[in-house]
Image (cartoon, helix red, strand yellow):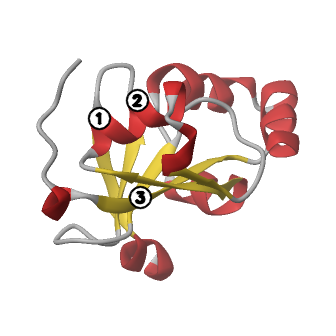
Amino acid sequence: MYRMRNEENIMKFSVHQMIPSHRKYLAEYKSDEYFQVSFYGKVPPSLFLAHYSKVCEIIAEDLNEVFEIGNIGPEEKITRIDRMHSISVGDAIRVEEGPEMGYIYIVKPTGFERFHTSRELEVA
């Protein structure tokens, strides 16, 4: 798909995914919670704070492009911080720059839902 590039719109985003050992624990012992996250993208703040970590930073124009890059590349737009899987339902994307800096979005089955700002999570 061809897109017009506007360098002014390029921003940094961070991707947060469930820590693998925590994912295994939730799948085994709290399967309903795990199901809600994995299939519906229902991530309560307490679960996010306890079980997610930052896995990479991606340079992109918007959330849709972050999702695309996180699944098919190009690799040069990804700065990996930890092991990660392709971006999928239940993952979180934090806006690191621009007017929405600090906002966190959860990947849903169709699209994204604004979760909380980083500041709101610090208070929670």
Q: Is residue 70 above or below residue 123?
A: above
- Of residue 68 and residue 114, the one placed in the foreground of this image is 68
Say the numbered circle drawn on residue 68: 2
Point 50% across, 35% down: residue:
74
Would residue 90 be visible to someone looking at this image?
Answer: no
- Distance from the alpha carbon under mark 3 to that under mark 1: 11 Å
Determine crowd level at label 1: few under 14, some 14-19, many 20+ residues with C-alpha closer than 10 A: few
Give residue 109's position: percent from left, percent from top. Answer: 38, 20
Would residue 40 be visible to someone looking at this image?
Answer: yes
Q: Is residue 66 above or below residue 27?
A: below
- Tag 1's secondary structure? helix
Q: Which residue is mark 1?
A: 64
- Of residue 6 and residue 116, the one placed in the foreground of this image is 6
Residue 93 in the figure: left or right of residue 54: left
Q: Which residue is mark 3?
A: 13
Task: Please report whichever mark, 2 or 3, sits nearer to the chain's N-terminal start.
Answer: 3
